[in-house]
Image (cartoon, helix red, strand yellow):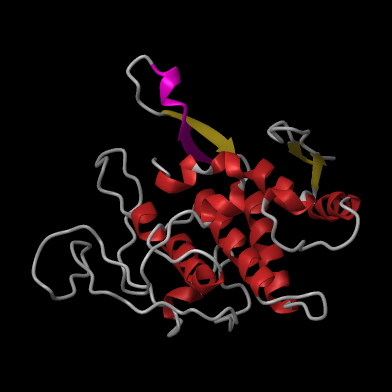
Amino acid sequence: MRLNNIEQSRKAGLKSALLALVGMAALVTAGCGDDTENRDGELINAIILPTDVVLDLACENVGVHPDICVLEDPQNPFVTVPIIEFDINNPGAENKFELFNSIPPGPTGAKARFYFWATALARRPSGENQFYTAVALHELFDANSNVLSKDEQTRAQALKAYRSVLDNFFGSVTVFTCCPGASPDGEPVPFPVGLSELTADILFRTDATSFMRLVEGDPILVLSLLLEWGYNYLPANPPLYNDGVISVITG
């Protein structure tokens, strides 16, 4: 799976990676045909994306596997948009990250990012889709909060979504590519990144995203929360922060 602009921005931090590409407020798939909507995935008319940062939850667990109520949410602009996932039997057909990269960066695209990833998750449950749904909720919380007032509803939903990565998709990975110079043929080298470790790092370390912390106070409180969820986390070390270890508590 290729992560396009996300994969190229990994070293700059997750937040800059997720906000990498300036796009238009309309999404169009690369396809062929006339100007009519085709729900089989060849062509989609431009759609209008929300630009506010206030999220009205369609149901209690929207954006948290296995709930799929986002597919019935009238505010969801992606309900009729074919989001095509990677298929080993049809490589190159996917459009997921192409569509994602067309969403405007920054707060004006945060709500659209949530609907996009929650829709992808509802249609195809995966750790990758759940993780990026959680990150989008985290971004919305950050965008709709300040030192005097916090968006507690979105905070709680983001924590649910991050927990779902651990509870339902523990061990899942997303794939980044980098370092074409390391390859004999000059092609980018794909490598997996554990989503459980990324989730714990984001909750523990503010600089992982630079978003406002979901768990306020000393980071040790994150370790306590993870313990409550049934997980043990040994935090990652600088400068790369790529050696964190999370495990399921048994017994």
Along the viewing direction, whichever of 195 and 209 lies nearer the viewer: 209
Identify the magenta region: 174-183
Q: Residue at x 34, y 60 (%)?
A: 83
Instruction: Locate residue 86, reporting x and y percent.
Output: 35, 46
Q: On the image, which quarter does residue 151 sit in?
A: bottom right
Along the viewing direction, whichever of 86 and 32 lies nearer the viewer: 32
Q: Is 25 left or right of 217, judged from the image as shown? A: left
Query: Measured along the vertical axis of the image, is residue 218 above or below residue 64?
Result: above
Query: On the rendered image, what quadrant is the C terminus found in?
Result: top right
Q: Residue at x 31, y 38 (%)?
A: 88
Along the viewing direction, whichever of 45 and 51 lies nearer the viewer: 51
Kindly give the residue lying farthest to the top in the view shown.
Answer: 184
Q: Is 94 left or right of 189, judged from the image as shown? A: left
Q: Is residue 55 in sight in this rendering?
A: yes
Task: Let me know if residue 208 is in the magenta part.
Answer: no
Q: Is residue 172 in sight in this rendering?
A: no
Q: On the image, which quarter does residue 77 sit in?
A: bottom left
Q: Residue at x 66, y 44 (%)?
A: 198
Instruction: Locate residue 195, reporting x and y percent.
Output: 61, 44
Instruction: Locate residue 33, reporting x and y percent.
Output: 9, 65
Query: Measured along the vertical axis of the image, is residue 243 above or below residue 31?
Result: above
Query: On the rendered image, what quadrant is the N terminus found in?
Result: top left
Task: Let me know if residue 179 is in the magenta part.
Answer: yes
Query: Measured along the vertical axis of the image, is residue 219 above or below residue 104?
Result: above
Instruction: Locate residue 165, reporting x and y percent.
Output: 62, 52
